[in-house]
Image (spheres, rainbow, N blue to C red):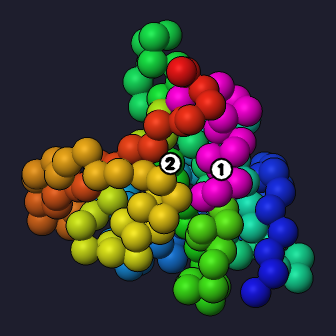
Amino acid sequence: MQSHIGQMKECDWEAVRSIYEEGIATGKATIETETPGWEEWDGSHLNSCRLLARVEGKVVGWAALSLVLTRCAYSGVAGVSVYVAASARGQGIGVTLLRALIEESERAGIWTLQARIFPENVASVVLHESCGFRTVGVRERLGKLNGVWRDVVLMERRSKVVGL
């Protein structure tokens, strides 16, 4: 499946939200149980690193970065979100998006990318490993999802061009 990667805009929010909702429904993608509104989502993600994957003009995936810490010294550290529509999973969209997000992050001066992934989300762990992320550790019982404590695998990727 040939995808086109482009910048996400506010007018893409409905498609982004729909894909996010599919991820939430799996119970393996996020601790969130509801999608936020545009304003909340927009305020929690970096403006410079928001990407969409389109196939034949249809949005089939998205990736974005959020600040992990607010102190100025950590301004080059960001959290990664990558979501692919159920109809497009297993077709290379995730790896294409994540590679593009890495490139975009380095242009924006980000030196460390962090991903927090449920251990049972093996596809996401493998995706991140294939793009140079390493497992830093497992944060046990980090949060509850539907009343059940969840562990989270913390992965990171250090840039080979920024922050050397």
Q: Earlier in the sequence, mark 1 or mark 2?
A: 2
Please, what is the three-letter code of the amino acid marked with disc 2?
Val
Nearest the viewer among 131 and 38 is 131
* Residues rendered magenta in the picture: 98-111
Q: Residues within 10 Å of mark 1 (few under 14, many from 20)?
A: many
Q: Residue 80, which numbered label?
A: 2
Relative to 59, 21 lies left or right: left
Q: Is residue 4 above or below residue 58?
A: above
- Figure quadrant of the C terminus: top right
Q: Is residue 33 above or below residue 10?
A: below
100 is within the stretch colored magenta: yes
Q: Residue 101, which numbered label?
A: 1
Relative to 80, 156 lies left or right: left
Residue 80: % across, % down: 50, 48
Nearest the viewer among 10 and 157 is 157
Q: Is residue 116 above or below residue 61?
A: above
Q: Could one spot residue 85 in this view of the protein?
A: yes
Q: Are marks 1 and 2 in contact (CB under 8 Å)?
A: yes
Q: Secondary structure at mark 1?
A: helix
Q: Could one spot residue 78 in this view of the protein?
A: no
State the image quarter where residue 41 is shown. top right
Q: Is residue 116 above or below residue 17?
A: above
Q: Residue at x 29, y 52 (%)?
A: 135
Q: Residues within 10 Å of mark 2 (few under 14, many from 20)?
A: many
Please, what is the three-letter code of the amino acid marked with disc 1?
Leu
